Amino acid sequence: MAIKTKTTSTSASSSYVDFEPASDLVKEEGLETLIIHLPDFKKEQLRVQVNKDGVLRINGERPTNGNGTKRNRFVKETKVPEGCDVNEIRAKFINGRLNITMPKKVVTTPPAPQVIQDQKPKAEVTNDHQKPNGENGGIKQKLKGRSNKVALGFGIAVVSMVAIGAIVASKFGSESSSSPSMFSKE
């Protein structure tokens, strides 16, 4: 990128040369790095900030002559790339290069919920005055309560039928020795 310059004089004693430093954006998996080329700058002359709107602001100022009346300065602003973790942005200045690393947020998937079924069905208390948990939340809760009641009723019916069958079998089972058998006796 070409360096743009603009000379500004704020008072009779000092003048500024505003410029735009050359920069590169390196994209890697899980990380983006902004590299700003700043030869002749020192770490103490640079400032890196991220504001509440997610804008990365880098600025710097340095004297160009011995008495400090002429100075170079720059301001560079860029939006933090989408998906980057603002709290993990780091800057490192080495050999005239400012490296600003912006790691992507690590997305962890929560473990799948494990369904544990009880051996005994529990009676569920339903309240017709419950507020719905969404568009159809109240209806879903009522249907869930009804399906549990139906399952409980079905379970009781099955147990009753087995008990009746056992009673009938025991009553008629004792008389089966005198009744004819389908199986041949050998």
Image (spheres, rainbow, N blue to C red):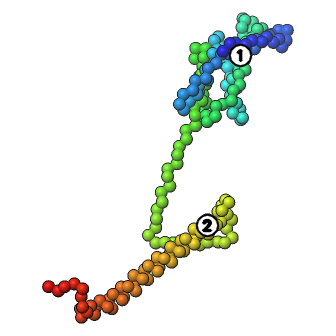
- Does 48 sit above or below residue 109? above
Q: Residue drawn 47% across and 79% down?
A: 156
Question: Circle 1 sits in a helix, a strand or a loop, which is it?
Answer: strand
Quadrant position of the C terminus in the picture: bottom left
Q: Residue drawn 53% across and 43% down?
A: 108
Could you say where residue 68 lies in the image, as x and y percent from the top left? 75, 9
Query: How dense is the environment of label 1, judged by Cα within 10 Å: few (below 14), some, or many (20 and up)?
Result: some
Give amino acid for label 1: Glu
Give amino acid for label 2: Gln
Q: Residue furthest top?
A: 66
Query: Which sits in the foreground, 183 or 125?
Result: 183
Q: Which image quarter: residue 175?
A: bottom left
Query: Which sits in the foreground, 147 or 112?
Result: 147
Could you say where residue 103 lies in the image, as x and y percent from the top left? 57, 32
Q: Along the horizontal axis of the image, is 182 left or right of 6?
A: left
Quadrant position of the N terminus in the picture: top right
Q: Residue furthest left?
A: 186
Could you say where residue 81 lies in the image, as x and y percent from the top left? 64, 31
Query: Which sits in the foreground, 135 or 37?
Result: 135
Residue that carries the numbered disc 1 in the rendered image: 20
Query: How dense is the environment of label 2, judged by Cα within 10 Å: few (below 14), some, or many (20 and up)?
Result: some
Q: Residue drawn 66% across and 62% down?
A: 136
Q: Are marks 2 and 1 in contact (CB under 8 Å)?
A: no
- How far apart are the alpha carbons under marks 2 and 1? 62 Å
Residue that carries the numbered disc 2 in the rendered image: 141
